[in-house]
Image: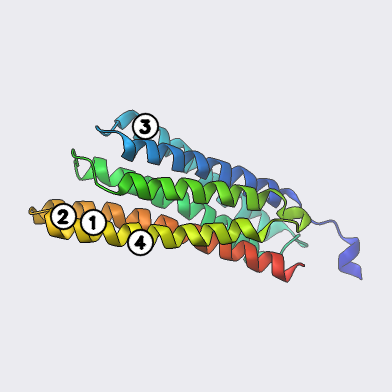
Amino acid sequence: MFNKLLPKEERYFEDFKDSISHVQEIAKLTHGFFAADTYDKDIFLKLKPLEKRCGEIKSKVIKRLNKTFITPLDREDIFSLIKNIDNIGEILVGAASRVDTYSVTEKVEYAEKMAAIVVQQTKELDIALQDIKHKSSQINECKAVQDLETEADNVYRAALKKLFAEEKDPINLIKKKEILEMLEIAADMCQSTANIIIEILIKNS
């Protein structure tokens, strides 16, 4: 009874939406980066400020959690959700940064397709997070993210099969494999985020 009389810190919901909007932009830029015939360093440079902003939002949420007595959702759910959203952006930026770090000059086959799947996943996550405050998020969007992750797995396996069959330079093979793997991990992280949202909805229904 006493807890119900205390104010809840509601700004977390805005933080979720703010963070996923930045991650969605990261996903779009990453897709554009891997879709280009020649990798554009200007696109890569646009990713870093967005990644930094997501990190700042995550840090702000964690600091607030330590100060807030009553939270609108379970503390562990808030922490897991904001951390996962931030991780999606970090992994995508990591995939693009490998191109720069490893001086990859030729297009990594299937990377564009995998990045496009992650773009769609972040769109579905954005929709799912819009009404989470009112417990009315559509689980359909979360399930769509899960289905897209399965698609990403299939693309990843096809990419590896072709890579190992055709790439003769072992160093290039390692570089390309790592880039593809990071994009696949990003898709996995989107699925993990969708799972957290579903758990929140079920727990608070």
Q: Residue at x 36, y 53 (%)?
A: 183
Give percent across and percent down for residue 20.
57, 46
Which callout, 4 or 2, points at the residue further toward the start of the chain?
4
- Looking at the rendered structure, the kind of residue marked 2 is Leu
Give percent across and percent down for residue 103.
19, 41
Q: Residue at x 36, y 47 (%)?
A: 113
| Residue named by callout 4 | 154
In whole angstroms, how far apart are the C-alphas of marks 2 and 1? 6 Å
Name the front one of labels 2 and 3: 2
| Residue named by callout 1 | 177
- Looking at the rendered structure, the kind of residue marked 1 is Lys
Give percent across and percent down for residue 177.
23, 56
Asked if the residue at tag 1 contacts the one at tag 2, i.e. Cβ–Cβ closer than 8 Å, the answer is: yes
In the drawing, does residue 108 fall left or right of residue 142? left
Characterize the local packing of mark 4: few (<14), some (14-19) or many (20 or more) Cα atoms within 10 angstroms. few
| Residue named by callout 3 | 43
In whole angstroms, how far apart are the C-alphas of marks 2 and 3? 24 Å
In whole angstroms, how far apart are the C-alphas of marks 1 and 4? 15 Å
In whole angstroms, how far apart are the C-alphas of marks 4 and 3? 27 Å
